[in-house]
Image: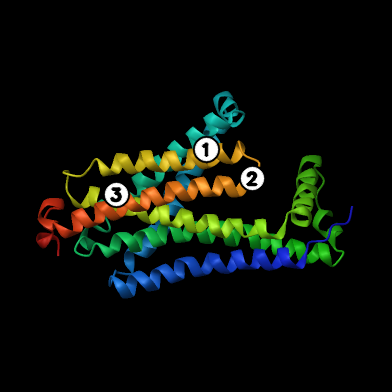
Amino acid sequence: MNYTVPTLSIVCMAVNVLMGVLIPAALFLVFRKKYRADVLPFFIGCAVFIVFAWLFEGFVHKLIFATDTGKAILNNIWLYGIYGGLMAGLFEETGRYTAYKTVLKRKYGNDGNALMYGAGHGGFEAFRILIFSFVPYILMSFKLNAGMGDTLTSGVTGPVALQTLQATFAMLANTPSALFLMSAVERISAVVIQISLSVLVWFAAKDGGKRFWLYPLSLILHAFVNAAAVIVSRHTSNAWIALCVVYIITGCLAVLAVAVWKKCASAPQSCHVSTESEV
């Protein structure tokens, strides 16, 4: 079967790719200029996401999903949502806390570094998802529209792999163009969440114990928003409704992060230990 991908769909996918670059770049420039944040936290945020979320968490997923328990989790949307949320929270928030207590310990003097870290962590996640997903889709779309779909399946012999490719072709051709933009809109929300959680964990690490509870709180909140996104998306036929739910949760997290920021940053003596000996 021949498939044709609408030009508008390709344009929308290209917008996603552009956003994958613009989101982290814009945040880096804004936090650098407005808060005089250091450069290092941005790249540490990128590195922590790669190591803790991409490598460590991914490795554990492979081990668990290869078991009978893992298969049971995959077959139950509630278990899958809760499991995925807890794993994301555990690995990413632990990675965040570890980075703050080690390589970024000398950066406590500028609270803007929490925002810069979040820009790196969430920004790289956006880059990975938007670039790695939609660049192949765009290239695939060009080939389909040029009548070269056979070249995409010529080396595929497995029936499952071939069926997956055909399903991808159909998705590209039949998905309403505007729905492709949902990925970029969703990533904006995700980056706000990452920055908000970065602020919570920043003060948990910086305080030296008095506000350590913000670290497990961030883990629970991370797990909740991920689980809610998965479960709600499965139980509604309208993807925009699910996205609205995520944005409502995002707004709540952002408000919490701002409140913590104002309380801790405005009263440094009560919110963190002195770092004079670390300078």
Q: Amino acid at mark 1?
A: His
Residue depicted at 48% across the width and 51% down the height: 247
In the image, is 247 to the left or to the right of 95? right
Identified at 78% across, 64% down, the residue is 6
Q: Are marks 1 and 3 in contact (CB under 8 Å)?
A: no
Lateral position of residue 138 relative to residue 99, left or right: right
The answer to whether residue 222 is visible is yes
Disc assigned to residue 201? 3
Residue bearing mark 2: 238
Query: What mark, if any, has residue 110 been given in the picture?
Result: none
Which numbered disc, 2 or 1, marks the residue that appears first in the sequence? Answer: 1
Q: Find numbered disc 2 in the image and state the secondary structure of the residue it sits on.
A: loop
Relative to 31, does residue 133 appear above or below in the rendering?
Answer: above
Lateral position of residue 87 relative to residue 166, left or right: left
> For the residue marked with disc 3, what is the amino acid?
Val
Asked whether 164 or 257 is in front, the reply is 257
Residue 13 place in picture, x, y as percent:
66, 63
Q: Identify the residue at image location x=44%, y=57%.
A: 191
The secondary element bearing badge 3 is classed as: helix
262 left or right of 197 in image: left
Mark in front: 1 vs 3? 3
Q: Select label 2 or label 3 by which is in front.
A: 2
* Label 2 neighbour load within 10 Å: few <14, some 14-19, many 20+: few
Image-quadrant location for residue 3: bottom right
Mark 1 and mark 3: Cα distance apart in space: 24 Å
Q: Is residue 53 above or below residue 110?
A: above
Q: Quadrant of residue 235?
A: top right
Q: Quadrant of the C terminus?
A: bottom left
Instruction: Say which residue label 1 marks.
Output: 61
The alpha-carbon separation of the residues under discs 2 and 1 comes to: 28 Å
